[in-house]
Image (tube, rainbow, N blue to C red):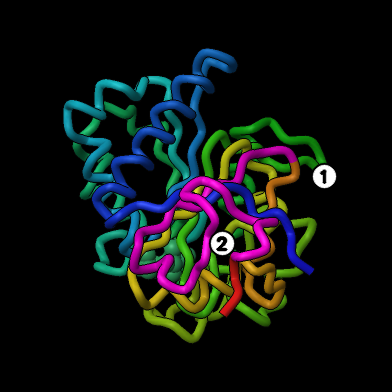
Amino acid sequence: MRQDSGELRLYPDSEALSEAAAGVWTASAARAVAQRGRFTVALSGGSTPRRLYELLAIPKWQERTDWANCHVFWGDERMVAPTHPDSNFRLAQNSLLANVPIPEDQVHPIPYSDNGPAAAIVYQRCLIDFFGLSAGERPRFDLMLQGLGSDGHTASLFPGFSTLNEREKLAVGSPPGTLAPQVPRVTLTLPVLNAARVVLFLVAGADKATVLRRVLAGDQELPAGRVQPTDGELLWFVDAAAAADLKVTSPSRLIPSPHVGEG
Ligand code: 6PG
């Protein structure tokens, strides 16, 4: 059964997609600070968001984020040292955080451990304390950045893993998925992803074309297909290569368009 998968916006390439994503970031940040005095964002990892992070650090964009009221978290992390090339923290630190005036105590990395579940418990406590959560409450991030793996995973929620069905915990440890890097992970759980005010998927490259079509056609076997904000906006920013298998009726309209996802 098809479901509303939010709004799709097509961009000619990754650079245009990243520029547009920077616009969503700065707009979300300005709205959050104006309404609540702070902006909370969960970063995604992998390679796609690198250009966005670099752009946010250049003067044109840097000046549009109130870094003094910005709080950065991660949607997932690989259990490797924070200096390891596969670290999602390292990606953001080198491309963004080291180059903007964000107070160090407003950067909340997922702790590295060779015991993923233990690290998840520490991270969950960090979320509970920061957001002042009561039992059963979930943190509501202003912006949740998401990527899409070619197997349909997002964050470190992998197809067929029991972590996908976790409804109580805010963060969990996960064994490696089938895609590199095959290391243990810590990930936010689906209810936390779906609690966000804005979920922004960034998808670029021809290798994502097949899986993107399946996700947007509502394939619930794929974790990314289960990201449906309960009271938030869902945006899919994709480049032309990743959109190659889609037949969308217009650049900014998606499902329940009858044309999306047809072979
Ligand atoms: C991770 C990411 C993951 C990523 C996708 C896409 O830690 O692996 O958070 O969810 O977003 O795998 O990765 P690419 O952008 O490298 O294609």
Residue 103, percent from left and from top: 33, 27
The part of the image, by quadrant, that contains residue 135 is: top right
Instruction: Report the side of 216 relative to 55 (left or right).
Output: right
Q: Position of residue 214 (x, y in %)?
A: 59, 74
Which is nearer the eye, 91 or 248?
248
Query: Is the residue at mark 2 in contact range of ligand 1, meaning its CB lies under 8 Å from it?
Result: no
**Labelled pair 1, 2 in contact (Cβ < 8 Å):** no
The kind of secondary structure the magenta stretch mainly shows is loop
Residue 167, percent across and down?
78, 59
* 96 sits to left or right of 209: left
Per the model, the C-alpha gap separating discs 1 and 2 is: 18 Å
User: Residue at the right extreme?
Assistant: 136
Quarter in which the C terminus is drawn: bottom right
Ligand 1 in which quarter:
bottom left
The answer to which quarter of the image holds residue 87 is: bottom left
Q: Disc 1 marks which amino acid? A: Gly
Look at the image and tell me whether residue 167 can be seen.
yes
Q: Which mark is residue 79?
A: none
Q: Quadrant of the N terminus?
A: bottom right
Q: Which residues are magenta?
A: 231-259
Residue 190, above or below 102: below
* Residue in the picture at 59% in, 65% down: 260
The residue tagged 1 is 136
Q: Is residue 223 above or below residue 121?
A: below
Please determine whether, in this image, residue 252 is positioned above or below residue 222: above
Does label 1 or label 2 sit earlier along the sequence?
1
Query: In the image, is 39 to the left or to the right of 222?
Result: left
Provide the residue designation for mark 2: 187
Circle 2: residue type: Thr
